[in-house]
Structure formats: C-alpha cells, structure tokens
Amino acid sequence: MRTIRSRLIAIGGLLVLAVWQLIPTNVTQRVRDPATGRMKDTTIRRVPINLGLDLQGGIHLALEVDQSKGPVPDCADAIQRAEKVVRTRIDEFGTSEPVVQIQGRCRLIVELAGEKDPARAKSIIQRTAFLEFRITDMKNLFRDALPEIDKALRRAGVTVAGQGAAAASVTQLFGTDTGKAKGKAPKGKAAAKDTTDLNAPGALSSLLFQGQLPGEYLVPEEQVPVAESLLARPDVQRLIPRGIELRWGTEVLSRAGRSYRTLYAGEDRPIITGEYLQDAKATRDPLTNQSVVNFVLSRRGGRIFERETGRHVNDYMAIILDGRVQGQPPVIKSQIGQRGQIELGAKPLQDAQDLALVLKAGALPAPLTIIEERTIGPSLGQDSIRDGIRAGVVGVALVVLIMVGYYRLSGVLSVAALALYVVFTLAGLAGFGFTLTLPGLAGLVLSVGIAVDANVLIFERIREELQHGKLVRTAVDEGFKHAMSAIIDSNVSTALTAFILYLVGTGPVQGFAITLIIGIAASMITAIFVVRTFYMIWLDRRPDMATLSV
Amino acid sequence: MIRLFANANYDFIKWRRWAYGLTAAIIIPGFALFLVRGLNYSIEFTGGTLIQVQTAEPVGPERIRSALDAAGIRDAEIQQFGAANEYVIRARLGRADAVVEGSTETTAAAVDSALARALGPSPEHYKVLRTEAVGPKVGRELQGKAFLAIFFSFIVTLVYLAIRFEWRFGLAAVLATAHDILSTIAFIRYLDLEVSLVVVGAVLTMVGYSLNDTIIIFDRVRENLRKFRRQNLYEILNLSINETLPRSVLTHGTTMATTVALVLLAGEVLRPFALVMTFAIFTGTFSSIYIAAPLLMYIEKRWPGEDARGARALRPAGSVPLTPPPSTGGSEARSKAAV
C-alpha cells in the first residue's frame, strides 16, 4: 500500500509540475500600432509554448558580411559589429522577441516572429550604421520648455496618465534637482482636483524624471509608449526648443525596484560623425584598473574634434548609433585631438568592449548580404497549426480505438497514461523553453503512436505469461520485467537518432528531434511507471482476480 | 478478448525467395531511376527560390508561367499545391534563366512584381504565403549537414548493434537497414517526393524504428535459441517471428494510424515527410521478417556460431512440433541452458 501511495504522490507531483508549466501566463508582445505605425507593448495571456516561425509566421534571415566589393579581412569582427547594429534597431521590428544571434564565425541569424512586412524588416537590417557624437542639452533648454508643452497638451485635452503615485514621485525627484523645476509640480492630489490649474503636473513632465546629468531624463519602462506618442505629436514637436533633439537611450536603469528608460535631450548637430573614426579598442588601465575605450580619428577628424571639444570642455557627449544613445554620455574633460579615451570607471571590461564595438560599427560599416530568407505568412502558419491539430486528434483517436478495442481494460489504462504523456510532453516543451515547429507537431503526433509501443510490448508479454498458466499478479510482474529490455532498446535507438538530428539539423528539424526526445522520456515515465501503478491499484482492490482484461 | 495472430504458426522463412523477388522488383527500377534522374531535392539543398502563392481565383499554372515568362523568369517550376488556387513556384539555382542576377532574394522580389503585373495588386488578387530564398552557400552547407546526419546515425547504429549483439546478428540487422534505406529511396523516387532536411530526418527516424523491430525479433531468437536446444535455426526464426507477430501488428498499427492521419490531414507541407514515414514503417516491418531473419540464417550457415546450429539452418522444419512448451517445461529448459 505504501508503495502505491508513494507512486501516486510521485505521479501527482509530476502532473502538478506539468500543469504548472502549461498555465497561461501574461506575455508581453510588441506590436505595431496600425494607426500610428509605432511600436507598442501589449500583454496577452497564452500558454507559454514557443511556436516556431513556421507555425506563427515570420521571417528568418541568415546574413553574411558582403564581400562582393572586396574581401573583408576579419569577418568575425565585422559580424560582431553588425550584430551590435542590428540589436540597436531591434525595437523597430514589428515583433515581440526578435532573435539576433551569431551563428558559427561569420554569420548572423535574425528571426522575427510575426513580422508581416519582409521588405521593411530587411531594409532595417541592411541599413548602413550611422554613428555621431552630440553634446547633451547643457543649458536645460528642453526642461525649461516643458511647462509650455504641458500647457499645450492640456489645451489639446491630454490628461495626466497615471496620476497619484507617478505624479507624487515626480515632485520628489524634481524637488531634489537644481531648483529650476521646484514648485512646478505640486502635490498630485491637488492636481487631480483641479486640472485647469496651470501648475498642475503636465501630461509630459509627469512622465519624465531628471537624470544624473543635464539633458538626461528617466522614463518608467511601462510609460515609454505613452511618452513616445506624446513626443511624436506635432504640437509638442513645435514647442521643443530650436537646436534640441530628443533621443532615446539603449540603457534600462533600475531605481528603487522600477525600471526606467533613458531619454536624452541633445544638440541637433553632431560634433563629429563615424566617418572620421578609424579604430576603437577596449582595455583595462593597468594602473587604475578601470575599463577604458581608446579611439583614433582620422587626421581631418582630429582637427574637427579638437576644435569642438575645446569649446565643450566639461560638457557631456552622447554617443549615438542609429539614433539611439549608447550608454551614459561621458564628460569631456579636456580638449581632445586625434586620439581619445573614454573612461568607464569601475564598469566591467565587457561594457568597454560593447562601446568599442559601437564605435567601430560606426567607423567601419559592415554591409550585410542576405544568404537565406524564409518568410512564412501568418495565415499559412495558422493553417498548419489547424491541420496539424486535426491530424493529431484523428491519429490519437485511432490509437485510442486500437488500444481499447484490443486490450480492453488494460487498453484503457494505457490510454489514461497516454493522456498524461501528452501533458508531460507539452510541459517539457514549455518548461525547457523549446520551440514547437511544424515537423515538431508531426513528431508529437508520431510519438503518440510510438509511445504505446512500450505498453503493447508489456501487454503482449503479460498475455504470454498468462497463457503459460501464471497467476495474474505474477504475470503482470513478469510481463513488466521481461518487456523492459525491449522497451529500453527501442527507445534508446530512437533517442540516439533524434539526438543526432538535433545536433546537425536546422530549426524545423531540431523541433522534430526535440519533441521526439521529450516524447521518449515522457513515454518511458507513463508507459512503464504510470501504467504499472494503475495495475498495482487494480490488483490491490481485487486481490483474488483470476482473469485479467488484457 | 480479441487476439490477432495468437499462436500463429506461419512459415515466413519459406517465402523468403518470393520476398527477395518482390523487394528487388521495387528497389532495382527505383534505384536505377534514382541514379539516372536523381531526386527532387528541395530548395534548401539546391539553393534557389521558392514562392507559395494563393490567388483569389484558381488561375491555373499556365497563367502564372506566362506572367513569369513576361518578366524574363524562365525555367521556373510551377506546381499546384494542395488547394486549387495555391501554387508553388520554384526557381532553382544552376538553371541559367531561372534566377535573376544570381541572387535568390532578388528573384523572389522579381516573381512578386511579375505576379502583381499579371494578376493585379497583392492582397486582393493574390497573396504570397511563403518565400524561401536560399543562396548557394547555404544549400551546400545543408547538403553537408544532411550527409553528416546520415553518416553519424549509421555509426551510432553500428556501435549500438555491436554492443547489443554478436556480429552475426549485427550484420544481418545492418543489411536489413540498408535494404530499408534503398527501398525508401526507390519509394521517394517513384512518387517524386521533394527531399528536404525534414524528409531526411524522417528516413533516419524510421531507420531507427525499423531497427527496433529487428532487434525485438532477434532478442526473441536469442532467447529461443537458449530455450529450445533441439530445433534448428530455421524453426527458431519462424517461431520467434510468430511469437512477436501480435506485438508487431499492434505497434505498427498504432504508429501507422498516426502517420496516415498526418498524410491525409496535416497539409501539403508535411505530406512528403508523412508519406516517407508511412512507407518506412511498412518496409521496416517487411525487412525485419523477410530480410533480417533469412540473412541471419545465411550468415550462420556460412560462418557458424558456437553451437554450429547454423550448419543445419537451411534444412526445412522437420517433424518437430513447434508449439510453445508449457510453462514448467520452459523454465526447465532455461535452467538447463543456464547450467
């Protein structure tokens, strides 16, 4: 009895674990707003199984450094720069989780699930990188213009988003600042009472928190889309001071448990662009043990940079790649000529290497050529899922019919175990974060057919043992014991083949291999352990059973 | 209780020559055709461009061909795909006029604009459902990968068999597997199925699956050789096949049920894959019984094993009854064998 109970507890535990993996969760998806053409985050609930591009539609691109206009000496280095560049553009894609990864040495893989516009995606990826250095808004011109912008927004009927907590914290943050903003944003409660009050927190300023340096603002991550859409309004654009441009940063900072995106106000004119940059290298200063990036400009670039930095000593310089501010803008300590150094202080060397990569990406653009493209329309993916599920349901129904018709009650036990098997396999896919592809779906259906093989072997063996005149209990024990080697054989050889396919194959084939491997593991558990437990319970209830329905 | 083939006592081995003839009749012409014409490799292997379109009305492949011809894209294959208004256009690399300016990706764009000109603007008159543009380098790499997959699974299979069985059994199983691969290639050639990496995967999986079948029969042969010391190999093989017959029928029945469901219902993309799997189950079962078992007999006759029973292997069954012994007798025989 105790063994039955502990077996049931084990099965129950596994089941709870499996169901836990399959509970629909909130998944943030980035979609393009059809009205404005901008990206926005939406949250939907769905079962957390990753679907491959062939099921949800999307674009798979393999790119290499274009060598048609002369060979590129170090393609591994070039592809790293290209990866950096594509990553900074990641938000422009119409998809939630773009995959950008380097494959092998010189190849970049970009996968955009759900993207509907391949031409647009390709042009984003293949656009030449543009690097520029700009001085941030040292005179706080943008901050001074904020009240006017808020007023304009209020006139246009835009109300404060997320009053209360957000508004109150604005007061605090701005209160600690240099003083110009003081009194501009009174208590949130008062504002809520009287929205016509000119001193009420503005729709825009309530979203912006002053950062550490002039021209740096922090926007709570969840408010970024709101801020983006406010800033894009023509009436707001008109009020942004002349000579100032706003640029989002790439960094996400966390302050007091909330995450913020950086927004920079800077001059609209670069002091220098990437074309003058020749090289950049990250090192660790042996004396101070600080991470630094050394960069070299062309002779002409050096002259321009010397003049500009001489005018901007003690100003902050934003490093902008493709319109995105990279890292925190460093301060210009003194006039810089052809050779410069960016100090990153105690930050890890990795950060310095990233920054060096950014600089090189602007200096030595790595034009990419598409060597493979696969685009699957969303409707085809949906059709595939529908057809696959239909085939699966029919296939499984046939298996159930065969098993129950042939083995009767024992067949029912194996079918019950089969239900567990399907749940375990899906949970395995979800839990380990593997991707379900169209061949994977086929593998899943197929593995249901194969999974019952273990039960067939066991049941046939039990039948034979019963025929030899053994008692029911002995026959069951012997059946399981003798069938074991055959079961292990068949599963090991299938698993080995699947493993090789996984190692060698590409996306869809890997999906097939993975479902097979997980399916095999799950079927070993259900066909042997679970069915055995069912038998134990059955025999325990009817100890005097003389015949077995098998 | 339903019992299929319970206590079956068919003389399978007797029909071996018929079986050889049948399988040769399938394999030899198919393989000859394969050597002459090759296989219909998918775009991912050959490099090239594939575009699947859905038109508002079933326009027919001729209309699409004339549209492509007008745009200077000749030598592309056009095939109706599943529904009457869906077509797949394939422009393979290596055909002079099929690919625009050597780039598979510009070809895709050229096909798209050619269709737009001939059929009308995109979402209303036709829709591109799927595009694949594979450069020559990627195609070559994938060929290499497929080769590696086949090579490694063969090595792993051999190692596995070497561990599992003595060499005579192993050799018979390997030859049966080779038969499965050849007959599957012939099958693919007959139906002119498109060979993609997924189809290669299906073949390899099913090779493993049919190997299991052989292993299960051979396991039984080994067990019976110990159990019945007086029977010759011919009888032992027949007995073992008959004893495992219900299991084979059931297992292949359930697996075939799922693959047939995939063939009929899972859509055009998966069909080659599902067809290959269905056939491979069939040929795997066939080869386990009619190829692996008789081959074992020949091998044992040529290079007799320890008890030299292979020498008498080919003598047909004598008057010795071949019914399973009562349980006590069985265990007695086992214990004797163990001594």
Image (tube, coloured by chain):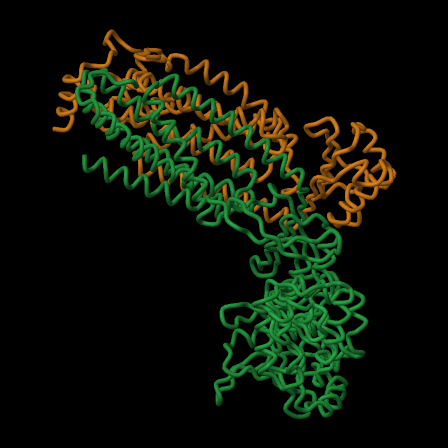
Chain colours: A green, B orange
Q: Nearer the viewer, residue B186 or B268?
A: B268
Q: Position of residue A35 (x, y in %)?
A: 75, 53
Q: In the image as oriented, which residue stretches furthest toward the front? A: A193
Q: Looking at the picture, does residue A525 appear above or below residue A283?
A: above
Q: How many marks?
A: 0
A95 left or right, relative to B95: left
Q: Nearer the viewer, residue A143 or A101?
A: A143
Q: Nearer the viewer, residue A19 or A172?
A: A172
Question: Is the C terminus of chain B in the top left, top right, bottom left or bottom right quadrant?
Answer: top left
Q: Quadrant of residue B292?
A: top left
B307 left or right, relative to A295: left
Q: Quadrant of residue A498?
A: top left
Q: Quadrant of residue A517?
A: top left
Question: Is the N terminus of chain B in the top left, top right, bottom left or bottom right quadrant?
Answer: top left
Q: Position of residue A523 (x, y in %)?
A: 37, 35
Q: Looking at the picture, does residue A152 appear above or below residue A424?
A: below
- Residue displayed at 13% across by 24% down: B336
Q: Nearer the viewer, residue B221 or A355?
A: A355
Q: Report whether residue A239 is seen.
A: yes
Q: Position of residue A126 (x, y in %)?
A: 72, 60
Q: Report whether residue B148 is seen.
A: no
A353 left or right, relative to A185: left
Q: Position of residue B99 (x, y in %)?
A: 77, 44
Q: In the image as oriented, which residue stretches furthest toward the top? A: B319
A14 left or right, relative to B136: left
